[in-house]
Image (cartoon, rainbow, N blue to C red):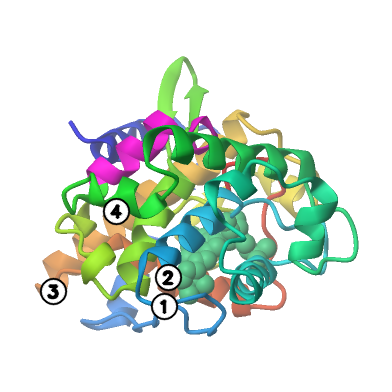
Amino acid sequence: MTVMDEVRKSSAWVATHSSHVVVDSSGIEKVVEKMTGSIPKVEWDYEGIHYFDNGPLTVQYLFVLDALNFCFWPDKELSYDHLASGLKEALQNDKSAFDADRLQKYTGPQLRELLKWPRPLPLEDERVRLLHEVGLELERNFGGKASNLVESCGKSAAKLVALVARHFPGFRDHSVYKGHQVFLYKRAQIFAADLWGAFKGKGYGELYDIDSITMFADYIVPAVLQELGVLKYSSNLSSAIETNSEIASGSEEEVELRACSIYAVEKMRELFRAKSGNQVLSVELDLWLWSVGVQSQYLQHHRTLSIYY
Ligand SMILES: Nc1nc2c(c(CN[C@H]3C=C[C@H](O)[C@@H]3O)cn2[C@@H]2O[C@H](COP(=O)(O)O)[C@@H](O)[C@H]2O)c(=O)[nH]1
């Protein structure tokens, strides 16, 4: 069983034992019917905010990016775009900014300065700790280079996600739900997807099993699925989200929001295939749903302090 099978299996378990979130199959049918045979194609980097030079430095950039790709919401003005474009600019100004030895030395204020952010970042100490972890482990086992890590995976996304989770504790996105271990691996999977997207499935982005990746369980896509009528919440959970109350990391509600999103997107994918005969990837569904979410001004999402998404 691959790591992604574990993600699918454990998410399905949550979806069938959930108390606060329901995956509505009629909601899924409506969405799939509306798609009439194809989903809106969203280009990777449609925003033009990522660094790309078609070489190993891009891999280093994407790994650093996804090591820090979590929890923007506590600062109303901060978003993923600031991280992606801030790191891009930092690298353009200094090609050695993400060398493994440099990664191990950043302080909070230096990271802020790198991103040109005027105040402390959310979970800044954790961000710094994770940068150090990435630098140290890359140095110890991969000659300092994320490109070596990718090359050692034989073009397999499943191997890459497993290897990243094995070596970098910060990417071990697991929870225990009603006594069962649930695997979500949001940042490890998005790293594989970012490689595939950035390199357009070639070179470092050639991954023969990209179809095995699930959606990336963050705080945007669940909210979009709820708006589409695919997810239904209990009244307590609805009001917690509407009033911006914090939902604890690892709580039943939080695990259900994330795992039910994975399950729902897998169901969408199956139904889409059954109806149209076309294969659609979870990565493609994810990018479409995510881009809808970040462009919607009034999207209300759940708030959890987490290093995983
Ligand atoms: N499911 C899913 N979640 C994603 C992404 C991305 C970025 N992917 C880039 C890669 C290529 C494309 O061009 C995209 O630009 C970030 N996130 C998550 O969203 C949240 C940030 O929201 P806000 O606070 O509003 O910026 C946060 O949890 C972050 O981890 C994605 O693709 N899928």
Q: CA distance from mark 1 to mark 4?
A: 33 Å
Magenta region, mostly helix, strand or loop? helix
The answer to whether the residues at label 1 and label 4 have Cβ atoms under 8 Å apart is: no
Look at the numbered disc 1 and give the secondary structure of its residue. loop
Q: At label 3, which amino acid type do we have?
A: Asn
Residue annotated with mark 3: 278
Question: For residue 9, what is the image quadrant?
Answer: top left
Looking at the image, is mark 3 or mark 1 earlier in the sequence? Answer: 1
Q: At label 4, which amino acid type do we have?
A: Glu
Residue annotated with mark 2: 287
Q: Position of residue 178 (x, y in %)?
A: 49, 19
Residue nearest the viewer, comparing 290 with 135: 135
Q: Is residue 229 visible?
A: no
The answer to whether the residues at label 3 and label 2 have Cβ atoms under 8 Å apart is: no
The span picked out in magenta is 158-171
- Asked whether mark 2 lies closer than 8 Å to ligand 1, one says yes
Q: Position of residue 288 (x, y in %)?
A: 42, 74
* Residue 91 sits inside the magenta stretch: no
Q: Position of residue 106 (x, y in %)?
A: 72, 47
Q: CA distance from mark 3 to mark 2?
A: 18 Å
Classify the position of ligand 1 by quadrant: top left, top right, bottom left or bottom right.
Answer: bottom right
